[in-house]
Amino acid sequence: DSEPVPSPKHAKGRRPAGATVEVSIMALSLLCGRTKECRAFMADLLDEYKRYPEQIKPGIIRVVSELLDAVKRQGGDIEKAWEAYAAFVDAANTLNTPEELLKAAEKVLRRVARTCSVDFMDRYVYMPAVVTVLQKEYAREKLLTETAKSTGVALSTITRSLEHKTGANFSEVLGRIRILHARRLLRTTALPATSIAKLVGIHDQANFGKLFKRYCRDTPGAYRARFRK
């Protein structure tokens, strides 16, 4: 009941459902010095935007801007990063492929991680370990308990900090990360949905379908039909 209501169904000119929370999760990764997940996140968005070519440039520019805003809301000093963002926007007009756009956007992400992460990690010493576990071990069971044990931080502290930074509780953050990976596998592989569910850590197929539809407003099968390469 406490979960934010997802955005309207993905359509031309709109962000994918739930992108605000997902962007906040990626911004937190940047503040913890991790750019790999943000790059993959933007690559996924570009892949989905291919259905609407006219939306590729404005879409990726908007996402980078939203990432910077989310970093600022979470306590990052983005003044120097805005300079890199302005250069990226100017350059985007001359770039013709998604790969070129992604490479240019990466420069902004690296600037954010380089200029903001040190101060953030000094203030939130345990957060990099929490984010690393979430991003790398998302398929494991009882992840919250294991995260608390490995970091030596109380469960309540982890959940409260995550909710404060992302606007979502631990279960939703983990669920959205799992569904991001499931979306990628549905688009780029021929694996059945049952196998994909297990790969991302959801062992009940009915629960996978409900979670997928909650965050994407689509069934796994319908999503695959729209986006599969």
Image (spheres, grey):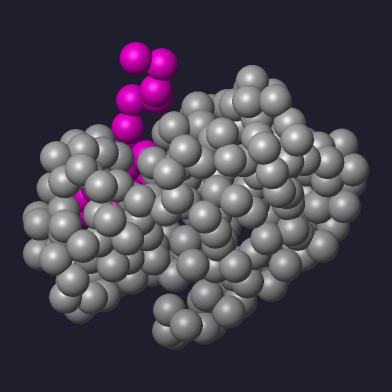
**Residue 140 versus residue 211: which sits nearer the camera?**
140
Residue 29 horizontal/vertical position (percent): 64, 52
Q: Is residue 8 left or right of residue 78?
A: left
Vertical side of 182 occupied by 1: above or below: above
Q: Which SS does the magenta portion mostly show?
A: loop
**Where on the picture, by quarter, is residue 127?**
top right
Residue 78 horizontal/vertical position (percent): 78, 49
**Residue 100 versus residue 192: which sits nearer the camera?**
192
Does the rendering let one see residue 23? Answer: yes
Residue 105 horizontal/vertical position (percent): 60, 70
Whether the magenta-drawn stretch holds residue 9 is answered as yes
Which part of the image, by quadrant, shows the N terminus? top left
Whether the magenta-drawn stretch holds residue 74 is answered as no
Vertical side of 23 occupied by 89: above or below: below
Say which residue appears at 32% left-offset and 32% top-offset.
Answer: 6
The residue positioned farthest toward the top in the image shown: 1
Vertical side of 131 occupied by 115: above or below: below
Which part of the image, by quadrant, shows the C terminus? bottom left
User: What range of the chain is rendered magenta?
Assistant: 1-19
Say which residue appears at 32% left-offset and 35% top-offset.
Answer: 7
Residue 117 horizontal/vertical position (percent): 81, 52
Does the rendering let one see residue 48? Answer: no
Say which residue appears at 28% left-offset and 67% top-offset.
Answer: 185
Say which residue appears at 68% left-offset and 60% top-offset.
Answer: 34
